[in-house]
Amino acid sequence: MFTGIVEEVGKVASIRKGAHSCVLTVAASKVLEDVHLGDSIATNGVCLTVTDFTRSGFSADVMHETLNRSSLGALRPGSPVNLERAMLAGGRFGGHIVSGHIDGVGTVKSIDEDDNAVWYRIGCDASILRFIVEKGSIAIDGISLTVAKVDSESFSVSIIPHTRAQTNLVTKHVGDVVNLENDCVGKYVERLLACSPELADETVRQSASVVSPYVEKANGTVSQKQGGITKEFLLSNGF
C-alpha cells in the first residue's frame, strides 16, 4: 500500500521490450536506501516489483495487462517518473490509501497558473470519472491530490509549488497522458451494493433510523416525507 506522497523523481534508464511486456530499469537513489528483491515501488503510480537492483537503480518486469492499463508503455529512456516505496506500518499517512493498481489513464486538457498555484484539468472516461468527487482524493501518476472541480468530462486539481517541484508534474504538457487511480472506497461500495441489492435497501433503512426525517437541501429549504426517510426519497432529492 502507498500514500501518494512521492519520495523522489527517478529517470528511466532503459526499457527492454518483449512481445507484449518489458523490463523497466529506473535510475534512482532515495528509494534504494533499504531496497530488497521483491519490494514494491510505485512508479508513476503503478505498483512494480523489484526484480533486480544496483546502487544506482532498480529493474522491474512490466506485464501486458499493466502496459494496456497505464501510461508506462509510453515511457522512453530519460523519462522522469514519480517513485514511492510501499508504506511502513509505523509511517505517517500523509496522503490517502493508494494501491498502485491503475484504473486507467487520463489526458491533460489544460494547465493554468493561478497566483502561486497551477491548475491541471484532466479528461478521462466516464468509468473513472464516476468515482471522482469534489474535495475527494485522486492519484495522478501516483501523486495523492485533492479534487477541486468535476464536470461531465473532466476533473481539475490545484497544485502548490512544492508538489509541482517534487514530482514529474512540472514536465507535463497539454495532451500528455497520466495514470489515474480512484479512491478505493467508492469502488468497493459500488461493487458491494451491486452484488447485494437487499444490502443496499437495508443500508438505507438503517441510515434512516439514526438520522432526522428532516433534510436540508442546498437551497436552504427543508423537506420531510411522512414516515421518515426512504430510499426513494433520497434518490429523488439527489442523494
Image: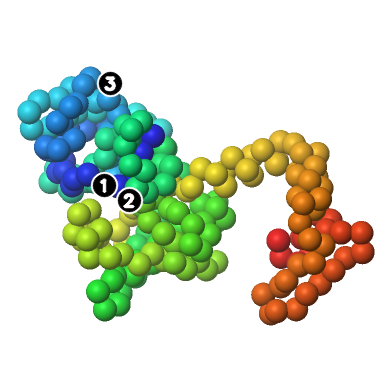
Up-down relation of residue 86 to residue 155 (above or below): above
Do the CB atoms of the residues marked 2 and 1 lie less than 8 Å apart?
yes
Front residue of 109/21: it is 109
Q: Amino acid at mark 3?
A: Gly
- Of mark 3 and mark 2, the one earlier in the sequence is 3
Residue displayed at 7% across by 28% down: 55
Q: For the residues marked 2 and 1, what is the alpha-carbon distance in whole angstroms? A: 6 Å
Label 3: how many Cα within 10 Å (few below 14, some 14–19, many 20+): few
In this view of the protein, can residue 123 be seen by the observer? no
Residue receiving disc 3: 38
| Tag of residue 143 | 2
Do the CB atoms of the residues marked 3 and 2 lie less than 8 Å apart?
no
Secondary-structure class at tag 3: loop
Where is residue 84 drawn, in percent x and y? Answer: 26, 40
Front residue of 206/144: it is 206
- Of mark 3 and mark 1, the one earlier in the sequence is 1
Label 1: how many Cα within 10 Å (few below 14, some 14–19, many 20+): many
Up-down relation of residue 223 to residue 192 (above or below): below
In which image quadrant can residue 38 be found? top left
Where is residue 65 drawn, in percent x and y? Answer: 40, 33
Q: Is residue 203 left or right of residue 168?
A: right
The N terminus appears in which quarter of the rendering? top left
| Tag of residue 6 | 1
- Of mark 2 and mark 1, the one earlier in the sequence is 1
